[in-house]
Amino acid sequence: MLELLIDNQQDDYLIPSDAVIKMWAAEALETADDVQVSLIIVDEKESQRLNKEFRNKDKPTNVLSFPMDMPAELAESVDSLMLGDLVICAAVVEDEAQQQNKIPEAHWAHMLVHGMLHLQGYDHIEDSEAEAMEAKEIQLLNQLGFENPYQTQSN
């Protein structure tokens, strides 16, 4: 079971409801264990600061994932495991959706699923990893009623 803690620090953007976000995140969860995830929705300045500090990239980004690295002995003593933190920049998600001619809600779902998969160990550094992660994203988004986010959108 997923406990999603949402801290929405943005009022200027059309952000999906907490209930919808929780449903998307739960769909991407691959365990039946009790887990917690923290989601913080930030502005471009905070996204850029975090991206620079943790990824050495001096620009805002759509989603950052910070998996929890909990020692095994501590994990065994808690009722629910903290999976990690997600940080989504509302402005970047909105801009990307517009630039890519995507429905904003579909791009929000993609970014949330993408981040949740990162928290569970998926990555896209190597080509084979990227293919596996993209296939999982496509499958999950399809289950949520969204099209393949990697198809080129036309005007």
Image (tube, rainbow, N blue to C red):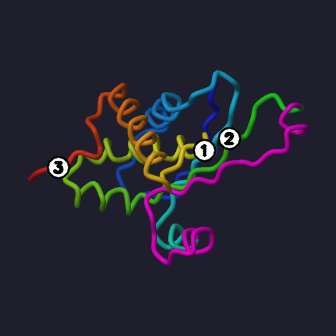
The residue at the point 44 percent across, 39 percent down is 132
Mark closest to the chain's N terminus, 1 or 3: 1
* Observer-nearest of 41 and 96: 96
Magenta region: which residues?
A: 50-76
The x and y percentages for residue 57 are 51, 74
- Disc 3 marks which amino acid? Gln
- On the picture, is 75 further left or further right than 30? right
Magenta stretch holds residue 109: no
- On the picture, is 104 further left or further right than 33? left
Label 1–label 3 contact, CB within 8 A:
no
Up-down relation of residue 30 to residue 114 (above or below): above
CA separation in Å, label 1 and label 2: 6 Å
Q: Residue furthest top?
A: 32
Mark number, residue 153? 3
Residue 103, quarter of picture: top left
Mark number, residue 83? 2
Report crowding for label 1: few under 14, some 14 to 19, many 20 or more residues within 10 A (C-alpha).
Answer: many
Badge 1 is on which residue? 119
Residue 73, quarter of picture: top right
Q: Residue furthest bottom?
A: 58
- Disc 2 marks which amino acid? Leu
Mark closest to the chain's N terminus, 2 or 3: 2
